[in-house]
Image (spheres, helix red, strand yellow):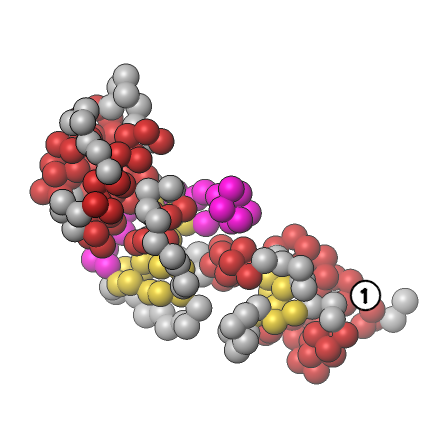
């Protein structure tokens, strides 16, 4: 076996495990970028679309899953937020073209692959790692808790809108411990008391409807 064959095998193994690899990392593994592009031309690997992002995957890797894998592997300081988080949790219905992520507004980050929102550090809280296999997200990503994501519903939909009320109702069904809701109410209030009081008041109502 040639050395190049062994490094190609190593790269394909990484892609099978991690789903994605950056062009820079791939070039380091294979020795030079021309070897990476040769593998692409042979059909063994493929560029993650849209073209120009600088990442590769196996040809049969789903594009959305590849984007989330890039997030999990290369952008670990970002947290999935906004309408993307609402959709993944089943609290929203918006079509998502680009993944929404939050970073503290003290952080410098520029990339076209994600829709970046800069937030105050005090709101960069209540973060967990979670995969969403049912939505094609096979790798664990940083995402706000469902309780914190209700604040995203208020932020992006607004009080009294159908979408906001729908998010409240779905949270009640999917995530609220109906027998012991107090701890979750406290979590919601600690994130932002003013908004939290609006959310908790609605959650306490038994007749919230879409």
Depth check: 31 or 88 in front? 88
Considering every residue shown, the one lying at the far front of the view is: 210
SS for tag 1? Answer: helix
Using the rendered image of the protein, determine whether residue 93 is visible from the camera's viewpoint. yes
Category of crowding for the residue at label 1, using alpha-carbon neighbours closer than 10 angstroms: few (below 14), some (14–19), many (at least 20): few
Q: In which quarter of the image is residue 175?
A: top left
Question: Residue 122: where, in percent of width, then height?
Answer: 20, 51
Residue range highlighted in magenta: 119-141
Return the residue found at the far bottom: 34
Please tell me whether residue 128 belongs to the stretch shown in magenta.
yes
Left or right of 63, for residue 78: left
Q: In this view, does 174 lie to the left or right of 65?
A: left
Residue in view at x 54 percent, y 76 percent? 51
Q: In this view, does 82 lie to the left or right of 14?
A: left
Q: Is residue 108 above or below residue 125?
A: below
Q: Which of 189 and 155 is in front in this view?
A: 155
Q: Which residue is drawn at 40% across and 63% down?
A: 98
Residue at left offset 41%, top offset 72%: 112
Residue beneath label 1, please? 6
Q: Which residue is drawn at 90% across and 67% down?
A: 1
Q: In the rendered image, is residue 126 in sight?
A: no
Query: Magenta segment: does it hold 199?
Result: no
């Amino acid at each position: 076996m040639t050395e190049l064959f062994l490094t190609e095998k190593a790269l394909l193994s990484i892609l099978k495990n991690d789903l994605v690899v950056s062009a820079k990392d791939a070039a380091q593994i294979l020795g030079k970028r021309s070897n990476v592009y040769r593998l692409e031309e042979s059909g063994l690997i493929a560029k993650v679309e849209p073209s120009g992002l600088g990442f590769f995957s196996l040809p049969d890797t789903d594009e959305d899953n590849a984007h989330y894998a890039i997030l999990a592997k290369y952008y670990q300081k970002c947290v999935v937020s906004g309408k993307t988080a609402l959709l993944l949790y089943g609290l929203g219905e918006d079509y998502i073209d680009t993944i929404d992520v939050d970073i503290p507004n003290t952080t410098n980050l520029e990339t076209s692959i994600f829709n970046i929102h800069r937030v105050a550090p005090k709101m960069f809280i209540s973060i967990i790692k979670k995969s969403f296999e049912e939505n094609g997200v096979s790798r664990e990503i940083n995402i706000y808790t469902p309780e914190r994501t209700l604040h995203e519903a208020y932020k992006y939909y607004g009080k009294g809108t159908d979408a906001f009320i729908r998010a409240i109702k779905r949270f009640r069904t999917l995530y609220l411990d109906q027998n012991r809701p107090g701890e979750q109410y406290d979590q919601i209030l600690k994130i932002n008391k003013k908004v939290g009081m609006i959310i908790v008041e609605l959650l306490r109502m038994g007749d919230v409807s879409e």
